[in-house]
Image: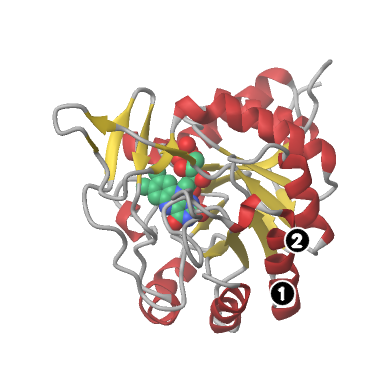
Amino acid sequence: MVVKKPNLETQIGRIKFKNPVLAASGTFGYAREFEKLTDLRRLGGIVTKTLTLKPRLGNAPTRIVETPSGMLNAIGLQNVGAERFIGEKLPYLRKLGVPIVASVMGYSVEEFVSVVEVLDSAKGIDGFELNLSCPNVSYGSRSKDGGVRMFAHEERLVAQVVRAVRKTTGKTVIAKLGPDVSDIGKMARAAEDAGADAVSLINTLVAMVIDVKKRRPVLANKTGGLSGPCIRPIAVRMVWEAAQRVSIPVIGIGGIMNAHDALEFLIAGASAIQVGTAGFVNPNACVEILEGIKRFMLDEKIRSAAELVGILNA
Ligand SMILES: Cc1cc2nc3c(=O)[nH]c(=O)nc-3n(C[C@H](O)[C@H](O)[C@H](O)COP(=O)(O)O)c2cc1C
């Protein structure tokens, strides 16, 4: 059998992506920043920087520090807000002709609903990724011991947000989960039972780097989110665990630098993948990953990307 043109299409909720390689939230700006550096039209899809109801300036600097095999960031969800996004950023994104997923976040269930309401009628948004797992902003308050609180930490909260958003929009709803939990399968199930079309994971891991001379954390926010190749084996394990517990698609994220890494996620059970930190090293990473997946499929005589999903041998 000779496979000439592998089928890379993947369906997530109501969105048909022409290939499974998406740009991850927060690492791709609003895409225009990458226009001269890569062919944006070749991407499977773009997940926007997380949008909040009101614009946010984000955290004070220092907000980024490099780590062995990765980086730590505490941007703090700097974004233009939902209204300005529609007026200033969406017209450009819409022209690219690739599915646009708006990442959204609220400080309460009601606020999640409000952001989605504002964006829902805007032409050019195909779905929503609910950022339930940002480590750099705390909801309500930090816990008493200073720990970071996230919706993604509790099944009940994951379910409440997903259920409320599900009632608000007929578009595709993806719940983005975080890694700082003991049972990711339970969280994914909570999202599925509440009506999510898919789950995406992982967001960054809460982490810290210390300047020993100053005896101070390097980041002004003290802690930040760790991303890059150092988190990949954790992400692969969590995608594998989640995929066994849900029947909705899982989108794999975490340290994907090349096609080999992306294939690990697909084989572990991801129907699509997102590329984040790699874009800072190589802005053309998504396209190169896509080419590499295609080459692998041709070499291995695999006709469709769907055939790869979850084919992990015992
Ligand atoms: C600088 C930076 C900003 C990020 N901002 C967001 C964000 O706004 N919303 C979100 O859901 N994830 C955000 N993330 C997390 C990524 O989307 C992704 O889940 C994580 O970095 C793991 O993937 P990676 O190792 O490929 O970067 C951000 C990551 C980085 C490095």
User: Which amino acid type corresponds to the residue marked 1 in the rendered image?
Assistant: Ala
Instruction: Give residue 101's quadrant in the image.
Output: bottom right
Q: Quadrant of the C terminus?
A: top right
Mark 1 burial class by Cα count in 10 Å: few <14, some 14-19, many 20+ = some
Q: Earlier in the sequence, mark 1 or mark 2?
A: 1
Kindly identify which residue carries mark 1.
164
Instruction: Give residue 218's quadrant in the image.
Output: top left
Cα distance, mark 1 to mark 2? 11 Å
Residue 106 locus on image (x, y percent): 53, 70
196 vs 106: above or below: above
The residue located at (46%, 25%) in the rendering is 230
Judged from this view, the residue extending furthest toward the left is: 213
The residue located at (15%, 33%) in the rendering is 214
The residue located at (41%, 35%) in the rendering is 278
Q: Is residue 284 visible?
A: no
Between label 1 and label 2, give the one nearer the viewer. 1
Residue 46 locus on image (x, y percent): 51, 56
Q: Nearest the camera: 234 or 266?
A: 234
User: Which amino acid type corresponds to the residue marked 2 in the rendered image?
Assistant: Ala
Kindly identify which residue carries mark 2.
196
The residue located at (59%, 28%) in the rendering is 234
Mark 2 burial class by Cα count in 10 Å: few <14, some 14-19, many 20+ = many
Q: Quadrant of the N terminus?
A: top right
